[in-house]
Structure formats: C-alpha cells, structure tokens
Amino acid sequence: MPMLRMRITGPDDHARAISNLLLGIDGVEHVEEVADLMPRLDDADSSSAGLPGDQGPAVTEFEIETPNSATDQKVRQAVEALAFDLDVLVEFENDDDGR
C-alpha cells in the first residue's frame, strides 16, 4: 500500500497533537513515526556543541497509510489546518504511484 510521508518541524508536543489528529481521521489505516535517518553535522566533541545557536526545532517524520487519494486529501487538509494553528512547519512527500 502506498504511503504518504510527512515531516513536522516544531515541538514534540505539537507533533503528538498532529499524530493524534491523524489517528482520528476516517480511512487512515496506519500511522507510524519513523526514525530520523539524517546524519547530524554537529560533532559531539565540537567546542560549539550544545550552544543555543546550534540547536533548532525538533523534526518528526510520519508515514501514513491511506486507501485512496480522497483520504490523502483529507489528511493533508486536516494536518495543514492544525499545523497553521500550532505554528509548525509541515512538509508532505508522496509515494511514486502518482497519487
């Protein structure tokens, strides 16, 4: 089944709120938080490690299984509305099946 992938940039509690929203949408078959596979450029031994200017907002990624493009659209609209209210950034990535 094709996946809708989403990246949330903002506090963890806001990402949890979006996850809870996803679980409540009719037609959403599966929601999974996936590990951040992006390597970090900050070296733990660096003299600037841990400084406030070095730290940014949290990034959380989700994979969402939906049966069709209509449900994809419902997910996008609901998440975009909540992300706007929470003042977080959301990015969507579709599978290559043309949905």
Image (cartoon, rainbow, N blue to C red):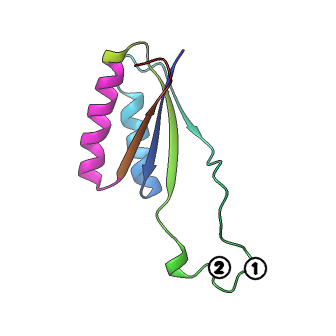
Percent position of residue 92, x then y: 41, 37
Residue located at (38% from left, 16% from top): 27
**Residue 75 among those drawn in magenta:** yes
Residue located at (49% from left, 68% from top): 56
Asked if one can make out residue 41 in the rendered structure from this viewpoint, the answer is yes
Res 45 label: 1
Residue located at (57% from left, 82% from top): 51
**Mark 2 and mark 1 in contact (Cβ < 8 Å)?**
yes
Label 1 to label 2: alpha-carbon separation: 7 Å
Amino acid carrying label 2: it is Ala
Asked if one can make out residue 26 in the rendered structure from this viewpoint, the answer is no
Image quadrant for the C terminus?
top left
Res 82 label: none
Res 49 label: 2
SS assignment at label 2:
loop
**Residue 54 among those drawn in magenta:** no
Amino acid carrying label 1: it is Asp
Magenta segment: 71-88
Q: Please, is residue 65 above or below residue 5 in the view?
A: above
Percent position of residue 20, x then y: 41, 37
Q: Camera-side residue: 2 or 74?
A: 2
Q: Please, is residue 86 above or below residue 22 in the view?
A: below
Main SS of the magenta part reads helix
Percent position of residue 72, x then y: 36, 23
Quadrant hosting residue 28: top left
Residue located at (42% from left, 29% from top): 23
Image quadrant for the N terminus?
top right
Q: Camera-side residue: 24 or 32?
A: 32
